[in-house]
Image (tube, rainbow, N blue to C red):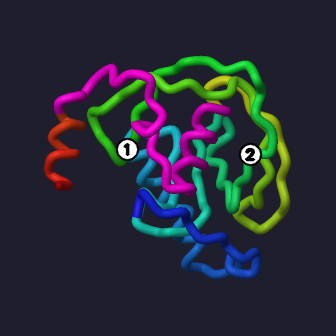
Amino acid sequence: MLRRKADTVKATELRKPELQQLFLDMVETMDDNDGIGLAAPQVNKSIQVAIIKTKEGALVLVNPKITRFSLRKELGEEGCLSIPGVYGTVKRSRNIRVHALDKRGKRINFKAAGLFARVIQHEVDHLNGILFIDKTVEITMGKEKLESMEKSKR
């Protein structure tokens, strides 16, 4: 599931109570695991939905697209709820522009910078079947665990 590109969500589907409940469940899962972002494929749903923690509460992004990446990039350490105990240094754009639908189907466009931009890029990668370990410059913690996981897949 984590290696597949997730399916687009139709705006009409956003009215369905089960999808609204999924958003609530994802926020709870993210919070229960001290996360700052969560993508639907991480909870076994192959749809283009990501939840991002903000100061104002959880931001639901449906069918998010990053339409502009700054040339300025920075290295930062990332982890992932799907690969607990493993951390790595990843180079990401410092600033981005995002187009998405909110949880009610309203179009939203915004700029993001710093950690907020990093989290969005990480979660959008999930929606495209990409894990942070695919982009890491260096595994900074949990290398043995990652190697063990790779061996068990063979």
- On the image, the x and y values in percent for residue 24 come to 53, 62
Position of the C terminus, as image quadrant, is: bottom left
Magenta residues, as a range? Answer: 117-144
- On the image, the x and y values in percent for residue 38 come to 50, 49
Extreme residue in the front direction:
154
Position of the N terminus, as image quadrant, is: bottom left
Left or right, 41 with reference to 23: left
* The one of 134 and 99 positioned closer to us in this rendering: 134
Q: Quadrant of residue 97?
A: top right
- On the image, the x and y values in percent for residue 146 come to 24, 37
Seen at 83% across and 53% down, the residue is: 108
Membership of 83 in magenta stretch: no
Seen at 35% across and 48% down, the residue is: 82
Q: Is residue 21 above or below residue 39?
A: below
Residue 123 in view here: yes
Left or right, 79 with reference to 12: left
Please name the amino acid that badge 2 sits on: Ile
Please name the amino acid that badge 1 sits on: Leu
Left or right, 75 with reference to 60: left
Q: Quadrant of residue 87?
A: top left
Seen at 37% across and 44% down, the residue is: 81
* The one of 137 and 28 positioned closer to us in this rendering: 137
Residue under label 2, please give it. Answer: 66
Q: Quadrant of residue 33?
A: top left
Mark 1 element type: loop
Membership of 137 in magenta stretch: yes
- CA gap between label 1 and label 2 equals 22 Å
* The one of 130 and 76 positioned closer to us in this rendering: 130
Residue under label 1, please give it. Answer: 81
Mark 2 element type: strand
Question: Quick one: label 1 or label 2, which is nearer the N terminus?
Answer: 2
